[in-house]
Amino acid sequence: MTANWENRTLWTADNLDILRGMNSDSVDLIYLDPPFNSKQNYAAPIGSRAAGAAFKDTWTLDDVDLAWHGEIAERQPALYAILDAAGHSHSKSTKSYLIMMAVRLLEMKRIIKTSGSIYLHCDPTAGHYLKMLMDSIFGAEYFRNEIIWGYGGRGAKAVSRQFPRNHDLIFLYGAEKGRKHRRVYKEILHPLHKLPSHIRIDKTGKPYKTSPRGDYTDASIARLEKENRIHRTSSGNIRIKYFLELRNSTVVDRSLVGDCWDDIPDMMHTPKDERTGYPTQKPLALLSRIIEASSDEGDMVLDPFCGCATTCVAAEHLGRQWAGIDLSAKALELVKFRLKKDTMLAEKVLHRNDIPQRSDLGKLPNYRTHKHSLYGIQEGCCKGCLHFFEFRHLEVDHIMPKARGGSEHPDNLQLLCNSCNPMKGNSSHEELVAKLTRDGLRRDHRL
């Protein structure tokens, strides 16, 4: 399914509303760097390009969280168990944070293609709880990697009574087969006059490294011998030569990147012209590696917590389509500034704060025609107050209002009594449940 939005679209809105309006199976790659529940306040320095960007990364359990939790309990019992356990084993704050993430990850699962990948960036604060969410939502069999971004390789700040923390976690999920993925290599530079022991210079002056013979046949070895690609050790063992690039008296050694990324420094150690001052900015090199590894040119890349829009900029540089979502209007200003500086594409960025209208549901009958089937499914009970009513006292309601991106698909319809329906208005179902519970009007006999 194609995306129901244009390339280079940036929304400044609640990402949950925007995600709910996106077509299913429309995104090739999702990278998200959400708040970490760090219990800190963040603000960009005055005078920096990102000045004015600020957010509070502290979560408290409120009525809407509890309403979401109730919906998850009904539709996703395994996910409910994880959220409930987090509240008991860690804190109510962590439970609130995970509920916020869960309802958004459920939408991301819907919109990502079967050939796509999702990278969730976090830190050890809630990382292992988030992995449990991902296992439940995407399926444990879709877990591919726990990537360690060791950004503190240049030294760590000393702390008392524990080892310094100098890494983030990135969880990668996607199908084992059919998913886009390519090997990524990093360059390691060695001065020609100071080579490590595994790099040698042959008689023609070319640098090389070796690997064991492996499964090469005798015929293949003979062919490689003629190509000067055989190295014999002092004990007579055969090893295969791999010639390396020589660049300005420097040997360039390419090494396959594994799941420990210690070659990309944090923003403090990146060039000044890349820094915007945004408090949680990530390096372009980090996003470029992710995008190159898991997408092709022309693919759609989405960042639902885009901040200073590093994902958008990296995707543009690599010839991908992209979309970003952030609550702060600062994201729009920063992406335009960063693209104009490098590619003069700032004027092509489309700014939106409206919810996209799904085009993947086909032509649907009038939503009121579902009233009889919904009455049977709900066994005559209002989805708000949960009381039983006669058929004539129930009305068809959009769970997510059309004004907030909701569709007329049966999955987005329910029956409410003629007291709950006007009370709900254009609010979400979770907000209605929270109000009814707060006012003592909702009595759930199932709890």
Image: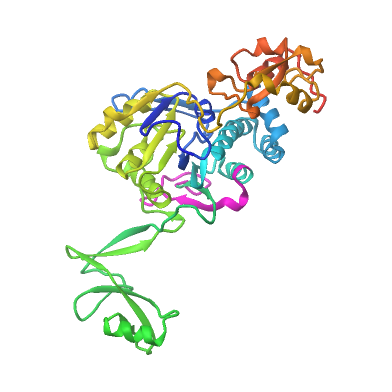
Compared to residue 226, the image places residue 320 above or below, namely above
Closest to the observer: 182 or 146? Answer: 182
Left or right of 62, for residue 237: left
In the image, residue 160 lies in the stretch drawn in magenta: yes
Left or right of 389, for residue 400: left
Q: Which residue is painted at 69% across and 37% down in the image? A: 76
Closest to the observer: 248 or 43? Answer: 248
Percent x, y of residue 345: 26, 33
Compared to residue 24, the image places residue 418 above or below, namely above
The count of marks equals: 0
Percent x, y of residue 68: 65, 27
In the image, residue 191 lies in the stretch drawn in magenta: no
Residue 364 visible in the picture: yes
Left or right of 130, for residue 33: left
Compared to residue 2, the image places residue 254 above or below, namely below
* Image quadrant assignment for residue 445: top right
Residue 45 visible in the picture: no
Percent x, y of residue 124: 54, 44
Instruction: Specify the segment rendered in magenta.
Output: 137-166
Q: Main secondary structure of the magenta part?
A: loop
Q: Give the colour scheme of this rendering.
A: rainbow
Closest to the observer: 241 or 403? Answer: 403
Left or right of 291, for residue 86: right
Compared to residue 146, the image places residue 55 above or below, namely above
